[in-house]
Image (cartoon, rainbow, N blue to C red):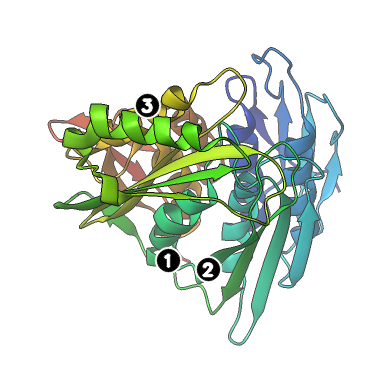
Amino acid sequence: MTTEFLEINGATGGGQILRAALAMSTASGIAFRMRHIRGKREKPGLKRQHLMCIKACAEICDATVSGAELDSTELTFVPRAVKAGDYRFDIASGGSTVLLMQAVAPALARVLKEGEQASVTVTGGAYCPFAPTFEFMNETLAPCMKSMGYAVSFSMPHAAFYQAGGGEVRLDAAGVFQPKPFAMTEKGKRLRTDVRILNCHLAEAIAQREKNLLIEEFGIPLGITENRIVVSSDAEISEAGNALMIRVACESGISVFSEVGRPRLSAESVARIAARNAAAFTASTVPICRHLQDQLLVPMALAKGGHFLTSSPSPHTRSCAQVIEAFTGKRVEMEQTDKGWEITIPALDEGI
């Protein structure tokens, strides 16, 4: 019997287009072939963190896979039925545990029946540059997923920066999936802004410089005062590292903005990057920040779809939209209005 593959061009996106395709395929049972993976990147093809996402999705649905090799630019993925169970995946580097969770969580939570439970434990990095932090997944994304009907919860037994790995993030899912359409178009009032600076095995002056910049440059627009900033360390984290998280709480929910320290990035730059993103969101009237856009699309498509108001769609959002359109055969609507951009996501199966 010849397998029919959904053809997806991976040249225009990075790892996000691959994770979106893996999640949609694992949940839907639709096989896909992706060519030109990360074709426009400086170093194209699959990297270690992408291979672990493939392995994780393949394991939970007993998929047949070809092309899952380092630097491969073509992948075929033939899923079978998703199985509830307890899974453990080790990225074996400081790769992002959060990004891997995003690929497996919706598909696994969808299949649970009355009385069934499932869990996924991922070891790797919890605070990684260019990736969401655990706090973002737990406080910003997870409440949205729960409102879509996903009975999921996340925890972080062990934190870690990206250099050494060793962090541990866990997903627990229990309860029958009861899909609901997602809708968020009103932001409401801003309630408060809080800051956490995680500064491990580094000079106290680094955190102090970050505090000073936040208060001096963003104290008024973000409402940041001395008593709203908490500086902490974590004795369980063995490597030196710095991460800054800004929580903006509105009536619609909590949006976490973060930046992780890395070589040649000053303490002031770490604080300024996170604060500029938080300030742009605070100044807008939209309830969904630019970093949450693409994270919502796949869970929405695998539930009952829906719509939300946000700022201009990011490249990641447009890449995810292309994947959803391929799997559902339905258009993702993106319309600019006087209040912002309204994005409407179709459901994979309206009969779910």
Q: CA distance from mark 3 to mark 1?
A: 32 Å
- Horizontal and vertical percent for residue 97? 66, 48
Residue kind at label 1, given as amino acid type: Lys
> Residue visible at 74% across and 41% down?
4
Q: Decide which of tag 2 and tag 1 comes sooner along the chain.
A: 1
**Disc 3: which residue:** 272
Q: Are marks 2 and 1 in contact (CB under 8 Å)?
A: yes
* Left or right of residue 244: residue 4: right
Q: Is residue 1 above or below residue 171?
A: above
Q: Say which label, 2 or 3, has the lower sequence index.
A: 2
Name which residue type carries label 2: Val
- For the residue marked with disc 3, what is the amino acid? Arg
Where in the figure is residue 63, as x and y percent of width and height? 80, 53
Single out the residue that lies furthest toward the bottom: 115
| Circle 3 crowding by C-alpha within 10 Å: few under 14, some 14–19, many from 20 | some
Badge 2 vs badge 3, beta-carbon distance below 8 Å: no
Mark 1, residues whose alpha carbon is within 10 Å: few (<14), some, or many (≥20)?
Answer: some
| Element marked by disc 2 | strand
Q: Which residue is mark 2?
A: 152
Give the residue pinned by disc 1.
Answer: 146
Q: In the image, is 109 to the left or to the right of 219? A: right
